[in-house]
Amino acid sequence: MRPIEDASEDAPVRAFAFAAAVALLAQPGAQRATPGVGADSAAPNAPTPALPGSPPSAVATPVAGPTFDDDASLPAHADDVVDYTLRATLDPAAHLVHGEGTITWRNKSTAPVRDLWMHLYLNAFKNQRSAYFRERVGGRGDVAAEDWGWIDVHRLVLHAPDTTPVDLWPTAERTRPGDEDETEARFPLPREVAPGESITLDVSFESKLPHVVERTGYVGSFHMVGQWFPKIARLEPDGRWAHFPFHHLAEFYADYGTYDVTLDVPESFVVGATGPAVDARIENHRRIERHVQGDIHDFAWTAWDQWRAARETIDGVEVTLLYPRGFQRVAAREMAALRFALPYESSRYGRYPYRVLTVVHPQEDAGEAGGMEYPTLITTGGAWWTPPGALLPEIVTVHELGHQWFYGLVGTNELRWPFLDEGLNEFAEVDAMGKWRGAGSAIDLLGLTVSDAAAQAVGGNMRVHDEPVAQAANAFSSGADYSALVYARTASILETMKRVYGVEPVLRALGRYARRFRFQHPGPEDLLAVFEEVLGAHAAATMRTALFDQGWVDYLVDFASTEESKRTAGIFERQGKRERIEPGASDAGGFDNSVLVRRHGTLSFPVDVVMTMVDGSTHVEHWDGEGESKRFSWHDSVALRGAVVDPDDRVLVDGNLENNHAAARSGGAGAASTLERTTYLLQLALQAVSP
């Protein structure tokens, strides 16, 4: 998920101010036609039937001694733990989903279990006593409930070997002592389920969608249906359940399996859903679509009678983009972003293994449903009038696509370690946007260019001393801290490492991590271990400090000086003779130059220091960043004009760029700054658009 607005209380004012500035700067221009997106046209009544999703042939089976630096070592499939076979019938007038089906779950842990935990996340929107509404910390979804939502389970019948079928629902523990939250339920089992044993549950439920609020809900006949079914929590290998309520800032965590879901909606509605449609028909004025997808850990869908659709095959993937009437220009831009990002991220983090991808751009009054990720389905966002030089629709689209890897294919615990999905993915977004759009990867208007990387650096540096990056989502004191640190700060840390240690080594490390832990559930230590493998112990230790210990750094030029050389006064023994040198005697020409650079903070990166001389010449000194300071002193025939530490802005996490340069005390004008420094104040003003 990407926060489309800043998480502070004055976000609407700041967002409006930015929009007004962009509107003033923008110039109307011709929109380049994009294949697959033309004039508005109604989506076809039914998608072309397709077979269940399967990995492309490029994904090979594991080989001996894999390095995970290419796709040869990728697993073909996930370990199947939980399968859902469901039928969902939408009543669009009442905004109800009637669901029934079966769930098959296998105990993959090393311990027997005597209870079962399930998430009932739609109950987050049932009342103001839910954990979600109690945690009003700011950020997305911090809106008043216009209509409540909930999930009612009617039956949950257990079928297991040597066990009489029993309905578990009447004995469910639906709340915890002293807590009225109903987003998770515990079910005592009549007997232990042994390691390796499977059980089947017959389930019947009814889900009432709320008026759209963060990820899910309805507006009129628009329906975005997420977290809509009873979902078994993940059982960790040691037999502990990773269950938790729906926290305001948190997202989800689940096992992999196969989803076989039949959707039943009015005939006039268009459906977008996880996985390919293997059957589609009209029956009694109802549209019936069956979607089947393996190797995933969630299922979401949308249904609306106003969707327009664009379709295109990108890198062998069947892409469907659903958008409202009047949004065809923005949809064209989003398809262009996918055309670049899908093959690029596949090459970086392992080939996208599914046959389909559905991209949903909600209508403007359903913006809370935008900027969210589910397996093979993402939602994007941006106003229909967004100028071509303001790349918000592209950024949101690329960000949500990246979640197919960082949360989708690498199934981290999004509550416990949100930086492992949102933070790594924010870096993947910054990297992809920079590769695609260069210096203007966030703003490119009238010659003004601002990079996505620079915007993230400003946002992350604003909150670096508030709290650590690496902590649980519900531990953050505010949505603003969560957004700035989990998203922006993590991205800036990795972007700094990329600039300092090299583009290819850092991208190789992240790619190795993504491939090695595909269809697994890694933690921070796994990430750090891979970075140590590729970049070495010092780089990994710096990364750990930056993530866990509120690590920060400020490189500065403390002073730069130059003065005409003077002979040293005193008595000297030279060539067998004693010689007196009087004070003030001039040394024939030349200057004594000196520069002192310092490092404040707990992080250290190697940096360059550029000395600019009065004749315009420069020379570069390298500092390994160790220690608190470094002095450079030398005699030269030319006077020093000034010095700049980190002239190429490689250390994006530098807390103060304004002290990175200094003029020599006896020289002329100060050293020239780079373009990103000259636009530093502008970047501060633009932080309203950074997460």
Image: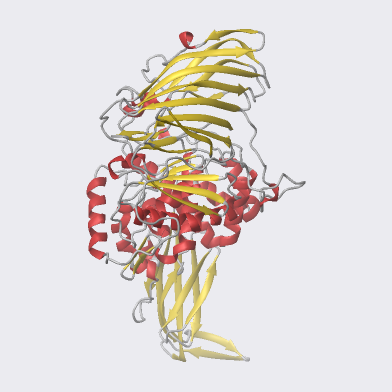
Question: Is residue 255 visible in this depiction of the protein?
Answer: no
Most extreme residue toward the top is 164
Percent of width and height locating residue 25 = 25, 65
Which residue lies at the image location 37% right of the left edge and 58% below the top edge?
391
Is residue 496 shown above or below 183? below
Q: Quadrant of residue 18?
A: bottom left
Which residue lies at the image location 57% right of the left edge and 44% below the top edge?
354
Which residue lies at the image location 58% right of the left edge and 48% below the top edge?
352
Percent of width and height locating residue 285 = 39, 30
Residue placed most toward the observer, 423 or 529: 423
Most extreme residue toward the right is 64
Split into 4 quadrants, where in the image is the N terminus? top left
Q: Quadrant of residue 81?
A: top right
On screen, residue 151 versus residue 574, left or right, reads left
Residue placed most toward the observer, 464 or 159: 159
Is residue 37 shown above or below 217? below
Q: Quadrant of residue 685?
A: bottom left
Question: Is residue 397 visible in this depiction of the protein?
Answer: yes
Percent of width and height locating residue 575 = 62, 91
Residue placed most toward the observer, 677 or 550: 677
On screen, residue 501 versus residue 385, left or right, reads right
